[in-house]
Image (tube, rainbow, N blue to C red):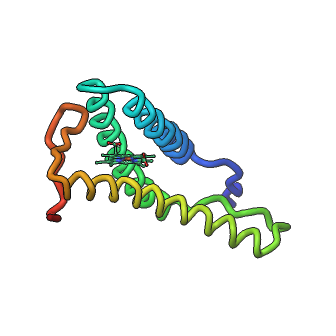
């Protein structure tokens, strides 16, 4: 009989901490953008956009991974309302991790401002006026 899992997989842990680090980076990039002026300030926004879109792709990949590899079961002694709250919080985080970059992408698209992903290639703008 297979041993019950008591630890998240390396892929899950990596995706988790990478996402956390990138979200913190996003806030620092905006702070740097606001503290500077001119081309450097605009560069910070460019990197912010690239990191944000990376978070979007990572999160979509993470959801696929998560569906194929369900989370560890919560402790049996945990009251049902706490289990529900824990699950709802996780879902809410996924919603934020998708909604925030989507809103940024939509805003850039609506403003017609090009996005060049880490200076490597032009990221398509959403077809919104
Ligand atoms: C998880 C991903 C993201 C997070 C956490 C995030 C977070 C933020 C935050 C906290 C601000 C400051 C808002 C304010 O000053 O009121 C901001 C501004 C902004 N974000 Fe994002 N963002 C993300 C993704 C994106 C993406 C994907 C784009 C575009 C493709 C984007 C474009 C912008 C722009 C253009 C601004 C305004 C910068 C300015 O003040 O000129 N963001 N973002």
- Observer-nearest of 109 and 13: 109
- Observer-nearest of 42 and 52: 42
Q: Say if 86 sits above or below 57 in the image.
A: below
Residue 38, percent across and down?
25, 26
Residue 129, percent across and down?
14, 64
- Observer-nearest of 37 and 29: 37
Q: Say if 108 sits above or below 23 in the image.
A: below
Q: Quadrant of the N terminus?
A: bottom right
Image quarter for residue 78? Answer: bottom right
Residue at the spot 31% in from the left edge and 34% down from the top edge? 47
Residue 49, percent across and down?
30, 42
Tell me: 41 left or right of 5.
left
Tell me: 117 left or right of 122.
right
Residue at the spot 25% in from the left edge and 33% down from the top edge? 118
Q: Residue farthest to the right?
A: 77
- Observer-nearest of 46 and 54: 46
């Amino acid at each position: 009989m297979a041993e019950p899992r008591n630890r998240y997989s390396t892929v899950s842990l990596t995706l988790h901490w990478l996402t956390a680090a990138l979200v913190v980076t996003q806030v620092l990039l905006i702070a740097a953008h606001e503290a500077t002026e001119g081309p450097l300030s605009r560069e910070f926004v460019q990197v912010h956009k690239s990191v944000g879109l990376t978070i979007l792709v990572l999160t979509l990949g993470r959801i696929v991974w998560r569906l194929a590899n369900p989370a560890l079961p919560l402790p049996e002694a945990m009251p049902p309302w706490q289990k529900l709250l824990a699950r709802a919080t996780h879902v809410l985080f996924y919603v934020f991790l998708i909604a925030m970059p989507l809103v940024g992408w939509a805003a850039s698209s609506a403003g017609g401002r090009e996005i060049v992903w880490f200076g490597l290639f032009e990221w398509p703008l959403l077809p919104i006026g």
